[in-house]
Amino acid sequence: MSQFSGTLFDLAGHTALVTGGSRGIGRAISERLAQHGANVVICGRKADVAEEVASVINARDGGRAIGVAGNITRAEELENIVAQAQSAFGRVDILVANAGLHIHFGPSADMSDAVLEKTMDGNFRALHRLAQRLLPGMAEQGWGRIINIGSIAAHFGSGLYHSYTLSKSLAMQYIRNIAVEFGEAGVRANTVSPGLVRTDMARGLLEDEEELRKELARSTVGRPGEPDEIAGMVVALASAAGNYVNGQTLAVDGGQTIRYVA
Ligand SMILES: NC(=O)c1ccc[n+]([C@@H]2O[C@H](COP(=O)([O-])OP(=O)(O)OC[C@H]3O[C@@H](n4cnc5c(N)ncnc54)[C@H](OP(=O)(O)O)[C@@H]3O)[C@@H](O)[C@H]2O)c1
């Protein structure tokens, strides 16, 4: 029995699939979901890294974990991830679509079809493909969670982050649609939009003093976030604590999006 048994944050008896669960924000999410009792399927392109995180989790109390290799931009690999998850744990009832692609910075004139398609595949279609596969089981048991990891970048217009914000915006709208379609069936679908978080993906920005100063100018806490500070919100949304939250986009950004700079 986990230390969270009987609390609002108890996830025992549930199974989560976390894309990009092997590093950064996804790793923190995987570890915290397991600590709260969920079994966790950790997916990343590199099997050894995903399996290593699973073994760290399996050495602790809490839910069990497996690592599965798969590229979220490829439909057939998503199918394989779901098949492996189901064969290890039966039904998957928490989907955390966390892995994301940010592969082009620059004006719209330079955004190629190939870049746009690949980014859409990773940031939107993977969410849809996995949700489409898992939602029938969630609806059948009357309980499920779809949690999309977005970005506050997609709450604004940007002259440089075109494909990234387009794909993340589509995913946010998709989440609202799923929330409407499946809310009465017991499924909750929400987006968590991180601000700047200390991970490999943000390393370029974190290591550039001038860029970091600009990025944090609107922060109300004056520092980047830590992966665990995103994981906490995901645990809340995944558990009974999040039962009445549906279709929302929650900015977990140190207050960056509420500040008016005069
Ligand atoms: N860090 C930030 O400041 C920040 C801010 C806003 C939003 N976000 C969002 O938060 C999410 C997580 O970002 P992060 O900063 O934690 O990234 P990260 O530290 O770079 O970790 C990326 C994770 O995703 C996996 N991954 C990458 N591409 C993949 C693919 N094509 N297929 C399957 N797995 C893949 C990686 O494993 P492999 O390399 O083994 O594939 C790794 O586990 C993303 O959606 C990102 O857009 C991040």
Image: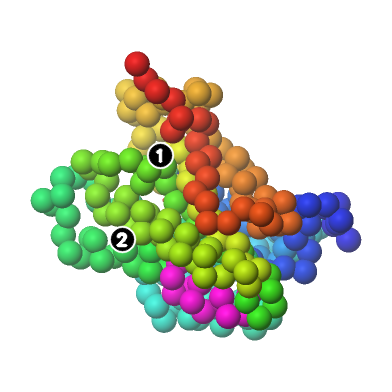
Using the rendered view, name the quadrant where residue 41 is placed: bottom right
Question: CB atoms at circles 2 and 1 under 8 Å apart?
Answer: no
Mark 1 Cα within 10 Å, few/some/many (few <14, many 20+)? few
Q: Does residue 46 appear in this view?
A: no
Report the quarter where the N terminus lies. Answer: bottom right
> Magenta residues, as a range?
127-138
Callout 2 secondary element: helix
Q: Which residue is mark 2?
A: 119
- Could you say where residue 162 lies in the image, as x and y percent from the top left? 24, 49
Left or right, 159 with respect to 176, comes to: left
Residue type at numbered disc 1: Arg
- Could you say where residue 67 lies in the image, as x and y percent from the top left? 59, 68
Colour basis: rainbow
Q: From the Cβ of disc 1, is ligand 1 less than 8 Å away?
A: no
Q: Earlier in the sequence, mark 2 or mark 1?
A: 2
Left or right, 192 with respect to 207, comes to: right
Residue type at numbered disc 2: Thr
How many labels, in total? 2
Report the quarter where the C terminus lies. Answer: top left
| Above or below, 175 relative to 78 | above
Q: Nearer the viewer, residue 209 or 177?
A: 177
